[in-house]
Amino acid sequence: MLPVVFWFDSEQATVLTDFFAKHKPRVLINMQHMQNGNARLQEFAALNIPVLQTLTYRDGNEQQWLQADQGIPARTVAPFLSVTESWGLSDPMVTAAVEDGRVTLMAAQIDSVLHKANQLIKLQQLPNSDKKIALLFWNHPMGEKNIAASHLNVPRSLVEITQALTQAGYTVTAQSETDFIDIAQQLLSGVYHPETLPDLYNRGLAKTLPLADYQQYLTTLPEDEQRALVNRWGPAQKHWALHSIDGQLQFVFPAINLGHLTLLPQPSRAGDPETFYHDTKVPPDHIYLAAYRYLNQQSINAIIHLGTHGTQEWLPGKDRGLSVTDYPFLTVGDIPVFYPYIQDNIGEAIQAKRRGRAVTISHQTPPFAPGGLYDELRDLNQLIEEYQQLELGAAQQQTQNKIIALVTELNLHQDMQWQTSQLTTEFAAFLAQLHDHLQLLAQEAIPLGLHTFGEPASVQNRLTTVMQQLGGPYYATLEVDAQQVFAVEAEQITESRPYQVLADYILNKNVPQDASSALLTLLQDGASNFENLSDPQELQALLNGLAGGFVLPGTGGDPVRNPQVPSGRNIYAFEADKIPTQSAYKAGGTALLELLKQHQQQHSGSTPKKIAFSLWSSEALRHLGVVESQILHALGLQPRWDQGGRLIALDIIPRQQLGRPRIDAVVQVTSVYRDQFDSFMHLLAGAIERLSQLDEDDNPIAQHSKLIEQQLLDNGVQKEQAKQLAQIRLFSNQPGDYGTGVSKLAMASTEWEDDSVLAEQFLSRMQYAYGTQHWGVALAATQGNLFSQQLK
């Protein structure tokens, strides 16, 4: 492996493909604050190589980082994790800290990154026939006869995966679905009946790790971890999973070799498979560590964790930014991990990525039974995912309040034997239990089968899912009562008119006679949704990852509310078009009222007519749009969201309903925000332009627009252009430009004497106006600085 260190100008769209035109790299390791991520994502996909993310801990030195609960401080999660995940970077590893004011590499951490890179290169270079894969399947609900993960048909998925591996040239012994059921049940018998382990070993259904090897391994762990293991589980030499094999004591655990594929159930966290699997405090049992140690000794080239969700990513250690000595990293070491994960469990998929070192491969949910409790469960799941993304603050509190309100409305807390008063005082503990309870409820609420990895649902089930995606507007155009359509058994839905019209259009390309334009649009949307459901891309993504390729990033979410969410993607949580959230909008209203109250106290009760705001990407991600919401409240705008929580419009609140004069807003947008949240900027720009034309006696937006328009006319700007520019309130860098240059100028303070130089620099770089008719334009030098004029 030959390392090449390079720096590039992020403004260039094809800098990586140009730089590596003659010599393609094997792996990219990012060690900087990357910008222009959309361009980089296209290049990563074109290069088709893994991109690893490294970070620096700037809150202290290495020792302080080792002792910290959070290896990556909360304030840096948004720019250095959330955003980069959306560009496809994976396996975030803290590799440096600050010692005596200098950034200093941490040897063990950087070694791990390099070893991981080397393992990924092996995936590219080794013939598939020589690669060794370990597949650990998750089994939930518990039971030796139950072989399933979260809505995943594990036996059929094993058939599809092993067939795909065989066809790709891997040395894997093919099995039928019946064979896999039999094998899995025998393996699970060793988990639930450990006394059978010696017999399983004799029949080739178990593997061993010598006690001596394990004890030697324990000596390499930090002393506090060695003590914790012994204090919780006792000395390793007295463990129940030890048996005398070939004249020595060895840990025995269920596993089988199918050619070069090692298949095993993920070991139990605590011996008992039904306890501690979600616990991040209790150390793993000796047998858990022994099984993973065995895999590391076998020169395994990749691990597949099959099924949502396993336990490795929930082991004790830092919340994020883990050390190589934290249990999640100790188990898998530097082996590449690929994790088929259900697409609607975004929050825990992020856990698998950040703590489990995994590249997730999203898989589809099964087809849903319509209506009933499941609609409320979707709302609750969406709120929980939103809560998990937020930092402490008003927006998180608003989301917590919504969760508690919905839980009490559905009486879920009573089912879980929680008192109403406890929901607030012990919310963190309740939320953890609520997740497990929702999993059980969801399983009961969906009678339409399980998903098979790599396989789309049946045509009939895809069509009924599309019907739910189209929802109320579709039934209304057909003048049909949706409740009557679904108030029958699932198989009878196919006899309904909505189903038959949709099926005839999608399958036979027949357009209904006298179809309205609204119905035709809905049918076209339905056809697009059907095509998305028909192309899972799951096996392709897994095979590409196992070949050392780049797994495309993608959002997750419930497919009924998010019809165009693809599967076969490395899941990320950040979705720009969901900002601001409903909770953030409410919190932003409270924050604006507080701001106005302070202003009135300081200015004899007067209310400002204009406020300047600054929008930063990192703040938007931390609070999911609280500052944006302050702007909307100031202007008197009401967001409109679709059923998936995406912002689709900004409606003007009537003056009488608003109850006060509007407040004009001038918005400075950072260059990174401009790149990531341009959809919000477009909506806001359009709304401000409408407000500028609104005839209200006390409308400062219209008044200021007319004033600026006249100034522009006086400076020689053409009439129509002057009117359009005067209505713009959003300003940033020129497209493709980043930063203000102020900090650099401030460092050269010996070259200037007046602070106005800094202001001029800022106004000059930020003068580019962003509106619906003009995107990133500035006035001619002789016509002035529009940003400066709007700030006055």
Image (cartoon, rainbow, N blue to C red):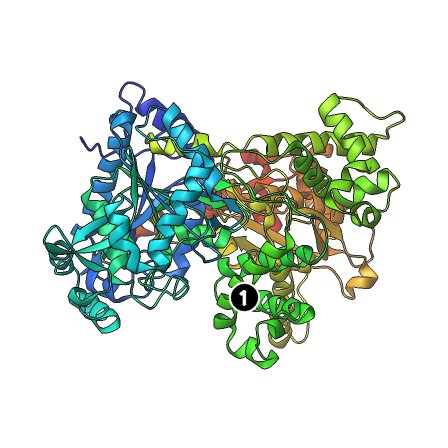
Q: Percent x, y for residue 370? A: 71, 49
Task: Check disc 1 and report its element: helix, strand or loop.
Answer: helix
Is residue 730 shown left or right of residue 744?
right
Q: As displayed, is residue 414 above or below residue 638?
A: below
Query: Could you say which quadrant of the image residue 400 lies in?
Result: bottom right
The amino acid sitting under disc 1 is Leu
Q: Percent x, y for residue 631? A: 63, 57
Residue 401 showing in the rendered view: yes
Nearer to me, 425 or 43: 425
Q: As displayed, is residue 234 above or below residue 120?
A: below
Nearer to me, 519 or 767: 519
Q: Percent x, y for residue 84? A: 41, 44
Quadrant showing the C terminus: bottom right
Query: Of all residues shown, which one is farthest toward the top?
Result: 22
Residue 25 showing in the rendered view: no
Which residue is drawn at the image coordinates 77% and 37% (left, top)? 494
Q: As displayed, is residue 523 above or below residue 239?
A: above
Query: Could you say which quadrant of the image residue 19 lies in?
Result: top left
Count numbered badges in the picture: 1
Nearer to me, 142 or 362: 142
Q: Residues within 10 Å of mark 1 (few under 14, many from 20)?
A: many
Quadrant showing the N terminus: top left
Which residue is drawn at the image coordinates 24% and 64% (left, top)? 240
Q: Percent x, y for residue 478? A: 86, 37
Nearer to me, 568 or 438: 438
Question: In this figure, which residue is indicated by the disc labeled 1?
Answer: 434
Q: As displayed, is residue 503 above or below residue 110?
A: above
